[in-house]
Amino acid sequence: MVSVDELPFKFVEGEGFKYFCLKSCPQFKISSRWSVSRDCFKFYEDEKKFLMTLLKSANQRVCLTRDTWTSCQKVNYMCLTAHYIDNDWKLNKKIINFCPISSHKGIDIGLEIEKCLHDWGINRVLTITVDNASSNNTALVYLKRTIRQWGESVGNCDYMHMRCIAHIFNLVVQKGLKEIGPSAKKIRNAVRIIRHSSTRLGKFKECCELEKISSKSMLCLDVATRWNSTFFMLEAATTFEKAFYRYELIDSSYKKDLEVRHKDLEVDDDEDEDVDGDRVHGVPKEEDWRKAKLMLNFLRIFYEATNRISGSLYVTSNLFLHEIYKVHALLKAFIEGDFELSIMAKKMKEKIDKYWGNPRKMNKLIFMAAVVDPRYKLKLVKLVLAQMYDEELANSFGNEVEAELVNMCGDYKQPIVQQNV
C-alpha cells in the first residue's frame, strides 16, 4: 500500500489509519514506520537483484532513455530508464536510476550513466534516447567510446545516439506557434477573462445550458512551455463557440474588458502582441473562430503523432518513419495550400529540416525498424525516401540501409554461432 500509493512511511502511525485497522481487523498488528521502511527497502533490493540476474543471463540488449531537469530547489536530477524485451517476448520498462547530478554538462551526464551501467552489470546497450540539448552530444561521444571497449556493441555503436522524436515534434510545433495569428490570442484573452471571475464562469455555464452544449470538458488556459496545452485550450474553446456569442449579449462589460484589458489579469506585456507589435484586443469574431478551428486541425496531427510514438506499453520504433513522413507531407500540403497557415508551416519545415532534412544525419535504426516490420519491408522505406527527398538520394540511401541491416544481422549471428560451438 505504501509503495503503490507513494505514501509517507509515517502514514502507518496516523490515528485515522490505526482506528480504521482496529475496526476492520482488530487482530492486525500495525508495523512501525521504521519496519515499513526496512520492508520497502528490502523489497527494492530483492527486485533489483532479480532484475540484475535477468539482464546478465539473458541475451537481449537494453535500450535506455535519459532525462534531466532542475528542481525548484535548484538541484539537478537525472532519470535513467531501461527498455528491454524479456524471454517471453514482452516489452519491459524499468527505471534503473534516479539521482542528483552535479551539473547538466555532457561529461558529467556521461560519467553518471557509465556508473549506473556498471552498478547494474549492463554492457549490452543498443541505443540511448536523449533530447536535443547540445550537452547530450558530448555525453554520447564519451559513452560510445566507453561501450565500444566493452566489446558488446552493435554496429560499432554508430546507432547508439537516438534523438527523441517526441522532443523534435515539440520543438517544431513551438517554432510554429511563435507565428500564430491574433485569432488564437483573442480566444485566449476571452477564456482568461471568463475564468478569472467565478460569477462570470457561472453565467457562462448558464449560456452553455441554453445553447444545449453537452460537454464534460470546460474552458482551460494554455501554458507557454507546453504546446499541447494550446491544443487543449483551442479544442475546449471551440466546443463552446455558441456560448461565447450568447455570453457577449448578456454581459455588457465583457466586450469592454477585452478592449481595455484590466491590469489585475497579470498578462505579460509581450504575450498578446500580434506580428506587427500591436496589442491584440476585442471579442473573438466568426473569422477568429474559423481560423482557430483550422489551426486546431493542424495541431491535432502533431498531438496524435506524439501520443503514438510516446507509448511505453508497446514497441514504437517501427512507427517513427511513418510519423515523420506524415508530418513532412502535412507541412508540405500547408505550405502549398492555405495562405493563413503557410507562414507557420514554413517556419516549422525549417526546424524539421534541421534534424531530418538529410537522411544520412538520421539514425539508420529508424529506417531499419520499418524494414524488419513484415508489413512494410524495404520497399516502403524507399518509397518514403522518394517522397521526402529526391529519387537519386532515395535509391542510394535505401541501398545503404539494406547493407547496414545485413551487417547488423552479422553482429547478432556471431555470438549465436560461438555459443553453439
Image: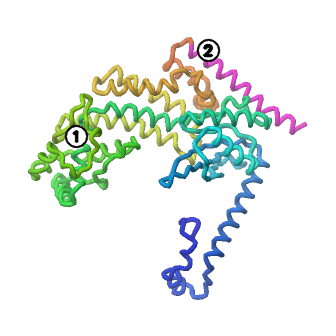
Q: Which residue is situated farthest in the top direction here? A: 392
Classed neighbour count for the residue bearing mark 1: other residues with Cα under 10 Å, few (<14), some (14–19), many (≥20): many
Start-end of magenta stretch: 393-421
Can the viewer see residue 319?
no
Q: Is residue 22 above or below residue 223?
A: below
Q: Tell me residue 116's x, y (percent).
A: 70, 48
Mark 1 lies on a secondary structure that is helix
User: Observer-nearest residue: 248 or 37?
Assistant: 37
Q: Residue at x 65, y 38 (%)?
A: 107
The label number, if any, that marks residue 162 in the structure image: none
Residue type, numbered disc 1: Lys
Q: Which residue is situated farthest in the right direction here? A: 421
Residue on which the image places disc 2: 396
User: Observer-nearest residue: 277 or 308?
Assistant: 277
Residue type, numbered disc 2: Ser
The label number, if any, that marks residue 186 in the structure image: 1
Q: Residue at x 22, y 60 (%)?
A: 198
**Distance of mark 2 from mark 1, alpha carbons?**
49 Å
Left or right position of 50 against 262: right
Q: Tell me residue 371's x, y (percent).
A: 62, 28
Quarter of image, res 345: top left
Main secondary structure along the magenta-highlighted residues: helix
